[in-house]
Image (cartoon, rainbow, N blue to C red):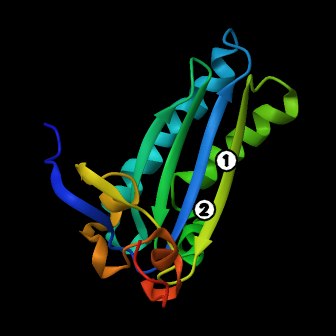
Amino acid sequence: MSAPVIRGRNTAAAEGVVVFLTGMRINRFRSVGGWFPVFRAMPRMLRELSRDEGSGFLGYRLLFGGPRVIYVVQYWRSTEQLFAYASREDGQHRPAWAAFNRRARTGKAGVGLWHETYAAPAGAHESVSVDMPAFGLGAATGVVPVGRRGETAAQRLAAGGESSEPSA
């Protein structure tokens, strides 16, 4: 089922957000025993996070960068909640990370991992969509009409969406 198109110009309703990008690159396709466990781990983590309303996890988007690269854009309420999940003893992340590190030390992982974290203070984000279903940050946090956060990108990036810049 596809998401409904939201008419007009909209922006994400987030009041502060952490964007976490993470992914894997298959370096050796024949090393299935090295990369397949990594490939299987992410869906388990995403299911766990999606079920835990108190985790601070807001949502995600899975993307493919060709036959070798898979990455996930994740949205979080705070870096503290992201870091708490990453270090949680009873969660899916810690054992998956430990297993990857064991395989990497042997040189048999056949896969590379990366991540980037971007933390925006309350209100300091910018997004716009026109005649689209909720997408990206807007899908994670909901959308509001653009005018509520500012008519221009500069206005929306200003803290709290407030700016004295005239509308463009």
**122 sits left or right of 150 in the view:** right
Q: Is residue 51 above or below residue 76?
A: above
The residue lying at 13 percent from left, 36 percent from top is: 1
Q: Quadrant of residue 167?
A: bottom left
The residue lying at 74 percent from left, 22 percent from top is: 110
Whole-percent x and y of residue 92? 52, 52
Q: Quadrant of residue 53?
A: bottom left
Q: Earlier in the sequence, mark 2 or mark 1?
A: 2
Secondary element type, mark 2: helix
Name the residue tied to disc 2.
Answer: 86
> Distance of mark 2 from mark 1, alpha carbons?
9 Å
Of 35 and 132, the residue lying toward us:
132
**3 sits left or right of 119 in the view:** left
Mark carried by residue 168 = none
Mark carried by residue 97 = 1
Q: Is residue 118 above or below residue 162?
A: above
**122 sits left or right of 101 in the view:** left
Whole-percent x and y of residue 44? 43, 43
Give the mark count: 2
Q: Judge the density around disc 2: few (<14), some (14-19), many (≥20) Cα neighbours within 10 Å.
A: some
Query: Which amino acid type corresponds to the residue marked 2 in the rendered image?
Result: Ala
Q: Is residue 168 above or below residue 98?
A: below
**144 sits left or right of 107 in the view:** left
Report the quarter where the C terminus lies: bottom left
The residue lying at 56 percent from left, 68 percent from top is: 82
Of 47 and 17, the residue lying toward us:
17
Q: Are marks 2 and 1 in contact (CB under 8 Å)?
A: yes
Secondary element type, mark 1: helix
Whole-percent x and y of residue 31? 70, 14
The residue lying at 37 percent from left, 60 percent from top is: 128
Query: Which amino acid type corresponds to the residue marked 1 in the rendered image?
Result: Trp
